[in-house]
Amino acid sequence: MLNALGLLKRRRFLPLFTTQFLGAFNDNLFKTSMVLFATYTIFTDPVSESYFNAAATGAAILPFVFLSALSGQLADSHDKARIIRIVKTVEIAIMLVGAFGLMIAKAGYTTAGLALMLGTVLALGVHSTFFGPIKYAILPQHLEPGDVLGGTGLVEAGTYLAILLGTVAAGWIPVEAAAIGVLVVAGLGWFTGRMVPPAPREGPPLKLNYNPFTASWRLIAATLHIRRLFLAIIAISFFWTIGSVLIIVFPPLVKNVLTADKEVASLAIAIFSVGVAIGSVVINTMLKGEISARYSPVSVIAMGAFVVLFSFLCRNWTPAPAGTLYSWQSFLAEPRAIGILVTLLAIATTGGMFVVPLYAFLTTTVEKDQTARTVAANNIVNCFAMTIGSVCVFGISAMGVTPQDMLFLVAGMCLVSAWLALRLHRACDDGCPNAA
């Protein structure tokens, strides 16, 4: 992975990396600002907070279900760099609406502000739907085969570093600064997006199918008949279902179980992002450029064990005095605080080790002119799985299950992910693509 850092000097990689970094930063700066503002300022009970977080998660992933097939077709049939420029121009308009929503919510018009913010999250989902297939599919086109795994790892690590910075910024700056910040970053992303080298269509012309239902079905059917791809996509989807549950329950857990303020919530989410980035680097170093799932089963089993440990640590936490919340200084002064943060870091690190190699399968198992559609098929299945996860959180929360109890569901799902990863590794015994 250290050798892969040399890719950051290349004109065929750095602009894409920077554009993806800025996009991920901006997305999380806005979403985290919105969620923390709603959790700590607007809503006053855990159930409402979980409902809103689930609604925001659903709004973010819904476009992937209906538009991923079209985005994959467009990316495989047009110049990917040109699509990036269009998408980044649209991002500026999206953030104008989002910034206005934050400002009017802050001014007291909460209903209109929440509606605009959720609309912005939906639009950001559309933005990510069209950009997502490109960030992976363009790598085999711009990089040598031996650099694809390293490039994938750098994109993943950079993405989670951007999530880290966006999350930290959202927790520590006022809403007004966040509204200005998302516009500035969108402008920077537009500039770097224009520097991505051309990536024209490589295969025969495609006849686009604009029907989201038939296009999605045909795309999935054309992809999942390849056993390695089927297992990789299902394993990735199950992982992101786990992620959707964690994303939904985490802010209410920090506020109501750990009784900490939004700076602590931001710190905890940031540590999670650091962990995934560390996991991306570690697994790439261990595999030395080889595209393999051999470490994925044990990684996700370890993740489940750390989730269980995290739940027990939360149960034994000493809450703040009634009517108060721990600041980040008083939180870190608590005896169990470091243990909680280290466990959270371990959850994220093992999660990153699990999922990064699986993404490399998506772009190296098929021909280059099919990579965007393969990533799009993965996104569709991921979003169905994440939607199911969000609906389950709705139902389980309504039944009165606490956030710390819901972590046991996450641990159980990790075992299923391990089984899927083991099947993928065994499917590769007959020979998998190798980037070495």
Image (tube, grey):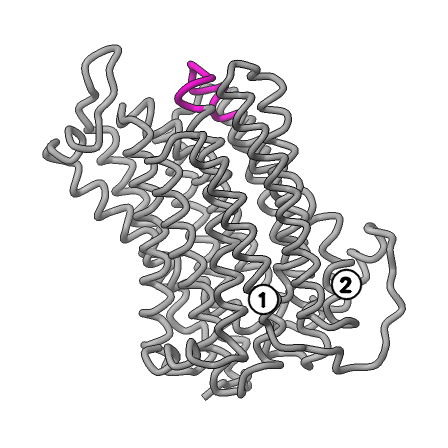
In terms of depth relative to the viewer, which is nearer, 205 or 162?
162
What is the span of residues highlighted in magenta in the rendered image? 39-51
Q: Which residue matches tag 1?
A: 135
255 drawn magenta: no
In the rendered structure, which amino acid carries the disc numbered 2? Leu
Left or right: 28 as drawn, with respect to 89: left
Quadrant of the image containing the N terminus: bottom left
Q: Which residue matches tag 2?
A: 219
Q: Which of marks 2 and 1 is in front?
A: 1
Residue drawn at point x = 73 percent, y = 59 percent: 71
In the rendered structure, which amino acid carries the disc numbered 1? Lys
In the rendered image, the vertical position of residue 78 relative to residue 398, given as above or below: below
Quadrant of the image containing the C terminus: bottom left
In the rendered image, the vertical position of residue 114 relative to residue 67, given as above or below: above
Percent coordinates x, y for residue 145 in the rendering:
53, 87
Residue drawn at point x = 38 percent, y = 45 percent: 411
Q: In which quarter of the image is residue 115?
A: top right
Left or right: 173 as drawn, with respect to 360: left
In the rendered image, the vertical position of residue 180 relative to residue 376, given as above or below: above
